[in-house]
Image (cartoon, rainbow, N blue to C red):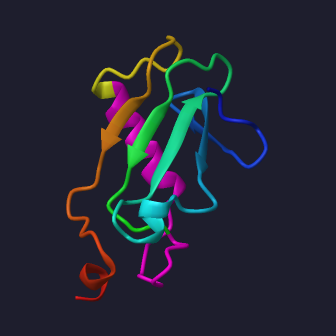
Amino acid sequence: MAIGRKGSRRIVVDGTTYRWRLRRRPTYDQALCDRPCTYAVQHADNPGTILVVITNQPHASNWFGAPSAAVLPSDVHAAITSALCLGWSPTRPGSPFHLNRSEGFMAGPEAAYG
């Protein structure tokens, strides 16, 4: 499934253009702070395998107001570079490539507040 242009952001990494998107609304588990925030990346011109990046932050719109950090273009750039080194082929069809960067994520609202 392709990422639409509306609501997605453009980023260029090593001369290649990608589009990335963060869900505006959290999933149920993300809203409960049980799962970390994720975002998707795909090749802009020849969409193939989508990269799904799992962050170590709660979604900004979680129901408990747990603090979170914004996903910055520099984070997306680093994730794309890492995924390419790990074998992600953005122009080939296939199932999503998951890049897990959730080390240090603590689930649940109590974990967010200590």
Quick check: 18 above or below 53?
A: above
Q: From which residue to which does the magenta span run?
A: 60-84
Residue at x 46% of width, y 15% of height: 94
Quick check: 85 above or below 10?
A: above
Quick check: 84 above or below 76?
A: above
- In the rendered image, residue 55, in percent from the top left (x then y), is placed at 37, 55
- In the rendered image, residue 110, in percent from the top left (x then y), is placed at 27, 84
73 is within the stretch colored magenta: yes
Quick check: 38 above or below 32?
A: above
Q: Name the residue nearer the viewer: 32 or 94.
A: 32
Residue that extends furthest to the bottom in the rendered view of this protein: 113
Report the quarter where the C terminus lies: bottom left
Report the quarter where the N terminus lies: top right
Residue that extends furthest to the top in the rendered view of this protein: 92
Residue at x 50% of width, y 48% of height: 39
Q: Name the residue nearer the viewer: 109 or 57.
A: 109
Residue at x 44% of width, y 63% of height: 30
- In the rendered image, residue 72, in percent from the top left (x then y), is placed at 51, 59
Q: Is residue 90 left or right of residue 44?
A: left
Q: Is residue 77 left or right of residue 111?
A: right
For residue 89, which quarter of the picture? top left
101 is within the stretch colored magenta: no
